[in-house]
């Protein structure tokens, strides 16, 4: 999936954490959490040379390249998410959960891609959720449709919380 799709998925993840923790959507904490969600949703692609995250976090990206970490392996795995959880423990509860859930959204939607991911890295098996003929290929029309669906959901969540909370 493209960075913009992952960013939107991270945004939705942040919205869900904010709703679950009953944080007012009209606050500075919300603004920070939504920004963190957008960034954390794209972070797993630090292992992909040329990606925005690889450029922004060049030292980490270079280290992963030196260690010969391939795309959609270590940074897309459950073990890496657990490591991030341990490193992120000092964060406040709100930002901790926004960061972890938004980061986890990245490998989750990459499971919809035809190439899949090594979710249980270092085991070499790749996992995908959809059969190849309906899997979402990076940059395809189906990804664009999926991204527009995600964008609609970003509007639905606050609408549901504030305009029609009883639905």
Image (cartoon, rainbow, N blue to C red):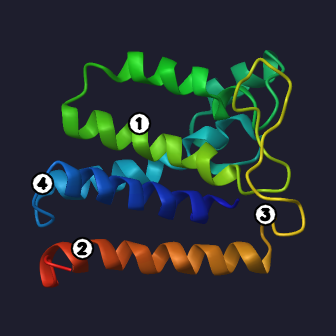
Q: Residues within 10 Å of mark 3 (few under 14, many from 20)?
A: some
Which residue is drawn at the image coordinates 75% and 41% (left, top)? Answer: 48
- Earlier in the chain: of badge 2 and badge 3, it is 3
Q: Alpha-carbon distance for marks 3 and 4?
A: 35 Å
- Earlier in the chain: of badge 4 and badge 1, it is 4
Quarter of the image with the N terminus is: bottom right
Residue 74 image point, x, y percent: 70, 25
Q: Which residue is labeled 4 in the image?
A: 22
Q: Residues within 10 Å of mark 2 (few under 14, many from 20)?
A: some
Which residue is drawn at the image coordinates 51% and 41% (left, top)? Answer: 104
Q: Secondary structure at mark 1?
A: helix
Q: Secondary structure at mark 2?
A: helix
Q: Alpha-carbon distance for marks 2 and 1?
A: 21 Å
Q: Alpha-carbon distance for marks 2 and 3?
A: 28 Å
Q: Nearer the viewer, mark 3 or mark 4?
A: 4
Q: Nearer the viewer, residue 90 or 118?
A: 118
Residue 60 image point, x, y percent: 62, 25
Quarter-wise, where is residue 124 in the image?
top right
Residue 23 image point, x, y percent: 12, 54
The answer to whether mark 3 and mark 1 are in CB contact below 8 A is: no
- Earlier in the chain: of badge 2 and badge 1, it is 1
The answer to whether mark 2 and mark 4 are in CB contact below 8 A is: no
- Earlier in the chain: of badge 3 and badge 4, it is 4
Direction from residue 51 to residue 87 in the image, left or right? left
Q: Which residue is labeled 2 in the image?
A: 158
Q: Which residue is labeled 3 in the image?
A: 138
- Earlier in the chain: of badge 2 and badge 4, it is 4
Seen in the picture, residue 72 relative to 39 is either above or below; the reply is: above
Which residue is drawn at the image coordinates 80% and 74% (left, top)? Answer: 140
Q: Which residue is labeled 1 in the image?
A: 100
Direction from residue 49 to residue 26 in the image, left or right? left
Residue extending farthest bottom: 163
């Amino acid at each position: 999936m493209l960075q913009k799709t992952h960013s939107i998925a991270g945004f939705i993840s942040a919205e869900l954490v904010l709703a679950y923790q009953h944080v007012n959507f009209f606050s500075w904490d919300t603004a920070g959490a939504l920004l963190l969600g957008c960034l954390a949703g794209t972070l797993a692609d630090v292992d992909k040379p040329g990606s925005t995250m690889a450029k922004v976090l060049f030292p980490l990206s270079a280290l992963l390249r030196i260690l010969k970490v391939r795309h959609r392996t270590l940074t897309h795995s459950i073990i890496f998410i657990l490591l991030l959880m341990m490193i992120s423990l000092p964060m406040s509860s709100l930002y901790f959960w926004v960061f972890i859930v938004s980061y986890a959204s990245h490998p989750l939607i990459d499971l919809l891609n035809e190439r899949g991911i090594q979710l249980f890295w270092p085991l070499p098996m790749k996992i995908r959720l959809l059969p190849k003929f309906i899997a979402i290929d990076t940059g395809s029309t189906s990804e664009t449709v999926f991204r527009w669906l995600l964008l609609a959901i970003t509007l639905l969540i606050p609408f549901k919380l504030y305009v029609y909370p009883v639905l």
